Image (cartoon, rainbow, N blue to C red):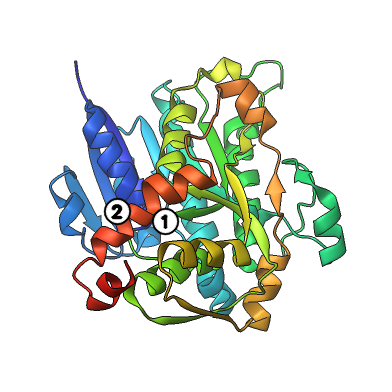
């Protein structure tokens, strides 16, 4: 059986590395990777070909590849995007649009829909104030779509671009819905936490940063308030969701954009978990007004009923299993050589 050609952009990121390892373990894929940086040693041998450099300038090369699936993970993340808004728009919007155009062109020309998996974000939401956030409860996909950040605006707009290129590009009669058009599918991820890669400075990284610092015996000043609450997810569940959605029959999907959820925690609850695992942890709260404002605009939790109904989404990790079986054991292994950790256990 021939291998499916798969493109993974943003391959060096947390999601990218975990996804590539999963695809390789499954087998049957020829994985082409793209990123600004060279591939880390952990995944270098798993890529059939790596294109290093600015994605926006390289997309024309991809027209020569017969990709069946594209995982477009490359992005300028929330905190960085607020500092360099024009560059974030170039990477997040222009890069996505050009890749969508390429995938739509190939779908049309070869009468075979390219699957385009897009990681969106809870940053696509935006609440007018804390009272509205706390009163909202579980937020559905079509509610509070008023993002407060450039990153959130980029993600929401790219969702709309995906819908355009998969449903309306060429302006066919709506009843036709030809099966050869681009097959765009997006997931609005909560804060993602990997036990195997270091936090990269994302706005939701205060939770894992807290525990990494505690494991090393280092003090940590959390940049959000103790009562700050958003939804989180273990990285294996994020990868599981991408694979399950990839494999879902197109006819079973009524939507192109789906929420998924696992567990919702406050920053204070993260601190309690850190103290339970590392009693000598030194954790304080020193909110950064800019970053606090970003997190305050995101939902405390989301309604993922649509994903559960249409493609049988179900997370494997709740909060207890995440900490007890996944995250804490792995970071203890990572820092086992540190004298400060040994004295805490």
Disc ID at residue 238: none
Q: Is residue 255 left or right of residue 88?
A: right
Q: Is residue 10 visible?
A: no
Tag 2–tag 1 contact (CB < 8 Å)? yes
Question: Which circle marks residue 34 in the picture?
Answer: 2
Q: Is residue 149 left or right of residue 84?
A: right
For image coordinates 80% across by 60% down, the residue present is 127
> Looking at the picture, how far across and down is residue 22, in whole percent?
29, 37
Q: Position of residue 179 (x, y in %)?
A: 53, 18
Q: CA distance from mark 2 to mark 1?
A: 8 Å
Instruction: Look at mark 1 in the image and give the residue it sits on.
Output: 74
Secondary structure type for disc 1: loop
Q: Quadrant of residue 102?
A: top left
Q: Is residue 225 left or right of residue 96?
A: right
Q: Position of residue 311 (x, y in %)?
A: 56, 23
Which of disc 1 and disc 2 is earlier in sequence? 2
Front residue of this view, candidates 195 and 215: 215
Residue located 49% across and 29% down the image:
245
Q: Quadrant of residue 277?
A: bottom left
Image quarter where the N terminus lies is: top left
Residue 52, above or below 187: below
Label 2: which secondary element: strand
For image coordinates 42% across by 76% down, the residue present is 280
User: Which residue: 39% across, 53% down?
Assistant: 327
Whether residue 238 appears in this view of the structure is yes
> Which quarter of the rendered picture does the C terminus lie within?
bottom left
**Is residue 312 or residue 66 the one in the foreground?**
312
Task: Give neighbour class at mark 2: few <14, some 14-19, many 20+ (Cα, 10 Å).
Answer: many
Q: Nearer the viewer, residue 196 or 330?
A: 330
């Amino acid at each position: 059986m021939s291998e499916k050609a798969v493109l993974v952009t943003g391959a060096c990121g947390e999601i990218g590395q975990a996804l590539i390892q999963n695809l390789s373990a499954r087998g049957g894929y020829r994985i082409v990777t793209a990123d600004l940086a060279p591939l880390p040693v952990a995944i270098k041998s798993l890529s059939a070909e790596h294109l290093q450099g600015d994605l926006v300038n390289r997309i024309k090369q991809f027209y020569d590849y017969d990709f069946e699936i594209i995982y477009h993970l490359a992005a300028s993340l929330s905190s960085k995007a607020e500092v360099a808004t024009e560059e974030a728009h170039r990477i997040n919007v222009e890069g996505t649009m050009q890749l969508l155009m390429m995938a739509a062109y190939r779908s049309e020309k070869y009468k075979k829909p390219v699957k385009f998996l897009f990681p969106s974000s809870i940053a696509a939401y935006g609440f007018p104030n804390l009272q509205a956030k706390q009163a909202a409860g579980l937020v559905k996909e079509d509610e509070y779509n008023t993002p407060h950040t450039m990153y959130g605006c980029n993600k929401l707009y790219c969702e709309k671009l995906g819908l355009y290129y998969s449903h309306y590009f060429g302006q066919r009669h709506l009843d036709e819905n030809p099966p050869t058009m681009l097959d765009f599918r997006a997931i609005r991820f909560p804060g993602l936490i990997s036990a195997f890669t270091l936090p990269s400075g994302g706005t939701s990284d205060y939770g894992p940063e807290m525990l990494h610092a505690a494991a090393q015996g280092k003090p940590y000043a959390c940049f959000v308030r103790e009562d700050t609450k958003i939804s989180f997810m273990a990285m294996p569940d994020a990868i599981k969701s991408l694979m399950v959605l990839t494999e879902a029959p197109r006819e079973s999907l009524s939507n192109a954009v789906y929420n998924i959820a696992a567990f919702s925690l406050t920053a204070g609850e993260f601190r309690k978990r850190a103290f339970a695992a590392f009693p000598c942890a030194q954790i304080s709260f020193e909110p950064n007004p800019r970053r606090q404002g970003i997190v305050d605009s995101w939902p405390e939790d989301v309604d993922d009923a649509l994903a559960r109904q249409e493609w049988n989404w179900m997370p494997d990790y709740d909060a207890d299993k995440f900490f007890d079986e996944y995250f804490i054991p792995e970071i203890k292994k990572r820092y086992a050589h540190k004298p400060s950790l040994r004295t805490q256990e």
